[in-house]
């Protein structure tokens, strides 16, 4: 599957489908934040976890009185600053937190672009990880090498499978959402291949 294909397919999903897809992708990214937080002592991974749970709830119960503004205010101070940490793990942690903020802004403003950007951020995290690995190993990390890397191929495949799932799930119910969450982390790893 080519990249354009997946993003084209995402654009064709309806609002709720885009929202649940973005949430499912964040399920795969969030543990990267947890690992960073453990390693550095920075940030509150549990806070991000509970904010994502709140987003799922908001998607399922759009009329609920959930205050996403408050959630955003809690998350913002937990986004690490690149300059403060000298480790690669800072990037995936920033990407996970930024994706979560995108999801929340999307839900607050009913802005589908925010949901689409989550899949782009997830893929960018993978690309950066591959570039980092290749550079460490003294290989040339050009676009072609990154695109053809097994981890990127896998990311594209997982995204495609999640889109399939979302396209076929019909109405967004708690049963469907449970199944989607399970599907998102079925392989037991984050989007950059770290074990959950």
Image (cartoon, grey):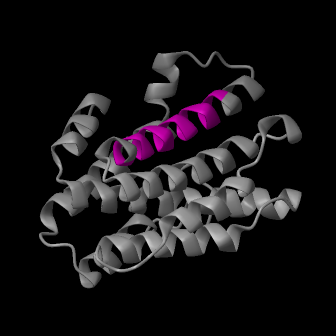
The quarter of the image holding the N terminus is top left
- Of residues 185 and 119, the one drawn nearer to the viewer in this rendering: 119
The image quarter containing residue 88 is top right
Residue 126 part of the magenta segment: yes
Residue 78 coordinates in the image, percent (x, y): 73, 57
Instruction: State the residue at coordinates (87%, 56%).
Output: 40
Instruction: State the residue at coordinates (68%, 58%).
Output: 33
Q: Is residue 79 above or below residue 179?
A: above
* Residue 74 left/right relative to 59: right
Residue 140 coordinates in the image, percent (x, y): 64, 15
- Of residues 120 and 161, the one drawn nearer to the viewer in this rendering: 120
Instruction: State the residue at coordinates (57%, 66%).
Output: 71
Residue 171 coordinates in the image, percent (x, y): 14, 72
* Residue 12 left/right relative to 180: left
Residue 123 coordinates in the image, percent (x, y): 47, 39
Res 86 visible: no
Q: Which residues are magenta?
A: 115-131
């Amino acid at each position: 599957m080519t990249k354009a294909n997946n993003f084209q397919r995402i654009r064709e999903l309806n609002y709720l489908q885009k929202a649940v897809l973005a949430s499912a992708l964040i399920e795969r990214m969030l543990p990267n934040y947890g690992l960073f937080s453990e390693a550095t002592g920075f940030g509150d991974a549990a806070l991000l976890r509970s904010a994502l749970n709140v987003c799922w709830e908001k998607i399922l119960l759009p009329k609920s009185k959930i205050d996403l503004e408050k959630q955003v205010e809690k998350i913002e101070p937990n986004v690490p600053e690149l300059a403060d940490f000298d480790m690669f793990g800072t990037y995936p942690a920033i990407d996970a937190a930024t994706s979560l903020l995108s999801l929340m802004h999307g839900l607050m403003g009913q802005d589908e672009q925010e949901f689409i950007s989550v899949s782009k951020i997830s893929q960018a995290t993978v690309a950066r990880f591959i570039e980092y690995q290749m550079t460490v190993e003294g290989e040339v990390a050009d676009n072609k090498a990154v695109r053809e890397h097994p981890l990127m191929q896998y990311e594209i495949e997982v995204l495609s499978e999640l889109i399939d799932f979302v396209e076929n799930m019909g109405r967004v119910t708690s049963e469907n959402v449970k199944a989607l969450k399970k599907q998102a982390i079925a392989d037991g790893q984050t989007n950059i291949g770290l074990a959950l």
